[in-house]
Every structure is written in C-alpha cells, then in structure tokens.
Amino acid sequence: MKPVGITFGAGLDSPLGVAVSLADREIMTMVADAIRTRRIALAYQPVVLARDPGRIAFHEGLIRVLEPNGRIIPAADFMPAIEAHELGREIDCLALEFGLRELARHPDLRLAVNMSARSVGYPRWLRILRHGIKAPTVAERLILEITESSAMLVPELVIAFMEEFQAKGVAFALDDFGAGNTAIRYFKDFFFDILKIDGQFIRQIHRDPDNRALLSAMVAIGKHFEMFIVAESVESPEEAACLQELGVDCLQGFLFGAPTVLPPWAPEAQARRA
C-alpha cells in the first residue's frame, strides 16, 4: 500500500523513487536559500604545467555553496539535482559573475569557469558574459568549461556560441572527456581549445596498462585537433610522472593543490602568510 499523503507520479512508483525526489527537493531548497543570501563562492584549484609543475598555467573556479555553519558543499553534491532547473542557470550566472570579477581585479590571473550548455540560451548569463569581457584583457584570460555530456545536449548551439566568443578571445575547454558520449565526428566542428580528461582514466594510471592505452589515444586525438591536454584528478607523483611521459600538457588535482575559497591572491590569504 502506498503511504498516505504521497502521490506517485512518473518515475516515482517505488519508495526509492520517492526518497530520491524528496532529497532533490531538499537540495533545491538549500541552494535557493544560499543564492538568496549570497552564500555562494568559487573555490580555486591550480592547473600546473606538466613539464614544470611549479608553474601554474591557470586556475579553475569551482562553484560552492556555503552553509550557515561554515560547511563548504562541493558542486557534485548539488549540481545533479539543479542542473536542468532554473536554479542551475542562476548558479551559472553567479559562477560567471564571480569569475569575471576576479579576472578584472587581477590582471595576471587566467581562470576557467564551469558552465552548462543550457546557459547559452539564458539571457542573463549572456548579458553577464558580454558585459564582463569588455574589461581590458579579460576575454583573453577567460576559459569556459563545458562538460562533455552538456555539450552533447545541443551541439549546434554550442558550436555557434563558441565561434562567436572565440573570436572575442575567450577559450573553451571540454571538461570530463571520456565520461560522456561525445561523438568523435563533432571534434571537427567544435574546435575546443582545451581537452580535460576525466579522472577515471587518471587514477593509478601508472599501474593500469588499459588506461594508459586509452589515455594515449585521447592525447593523440586532442593533439591532432590542436587542443591543450589537461589530466584531472592527479593525486600521486607516480601518476604525474606517467602522465608527463604520455604527453599531457597540464595536470590538475590534489597533488598540486585542493580547491580553496581563499586563493593565494586573496587579501586574507596574503595576510595569513605575512
């Protein structure tokens, strides 16, 4: 017998379906409240050159929700629930707004900001982008990251969007490559500047000949299409050394720095080092 007071709809014909739906609604309420009270921030993670890991190529700004008690919630804990909703567009707007603000304030900074292909048609997000890149050199230092699965939702729209803004100097990264269902034929049309290989192919790669073969193929594809190759989720010196040998251009992961809401250029971080 179905519990009294709960109406089962499509996809909610089991107790598990109801539990998932309720959990998603709680997440959406939490995110909506965080947006309303501006408890949103970017956490910055360095992306280093593989040939010289002491040099930072750029940072990635990862969106975070800040709970009233100070707990920082990563995007993986809330984005799946809000991605297809208006809240997802609002989060993208804030991420872009914060990223553009940091680029305008710090002329030596190069920054990647995540976005959904759904935001390409969102007027407020586009207004923020067009306004933000009017500041000197900001467009040339901005990287927009689009996940593989998101890019495949509306490839023709994404291609046209990329062409427009690449002409203005903005670079584009295909994020989490290997995790989705990219049709290889689209590589001839997309012209991504950066290819970021998903962490599932990186972990323990020095001990996994299958992943080494797959990553070598990905690197070859990326190089053919003149893309800069970034390996995500690098956590050990052994992984880093293997990736260097395989021809990866940049490395990102906890080995080189965890995401932080207090990046090195922030006044608070500088004060702590003083």
Image (cartoon, rainbow, N blue to C red):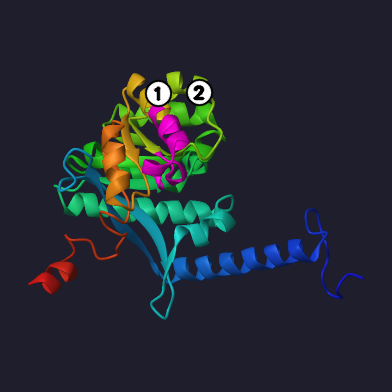
Quarter residue 191 falls in: top left
Which residue lies most toward the left here?
274
Number of callouts: 2
Residue 151 image point, x, y percent: 50, 35
Residue 57 image point, x, y percent: 21, 43
Quarter residue 12 falls in: bottom right
Within-10-Å neighbours for mark 2: few <14, some 14–19, many 20+: few
Circles 1 and 2, Cβ within 8 Å, touching? The answer is: yes
Q: Kindly identify which residue carries mark 2.
A: 184
Our reading of the magenta stretch's main secondary structure is helix
What residue is rendered at 47% in x and 34% in y?
210
Q: Is mark 2 on a helix, strand or loop?
A: helix
| Residue 133 seen anywhere in this rendered image of the structure | no
Q: Kindly identify which residue carries mark 1.
A: 221
Amino acid under disc 2: Ile
Amino acid under disc 1: Ile
The magenta-colored residue range is 197-216
- The residues bearing labels 1 and 2 have C-alpha atoms spaced at a distance of 9 Å
Q: Is mark 1 on a helix, strand or loop?
A: helix
Residue 92 image point, x, y percent: 44, 51
From the viewer's perspective, tell me whether residue 31 is left or right of residue 173.
right
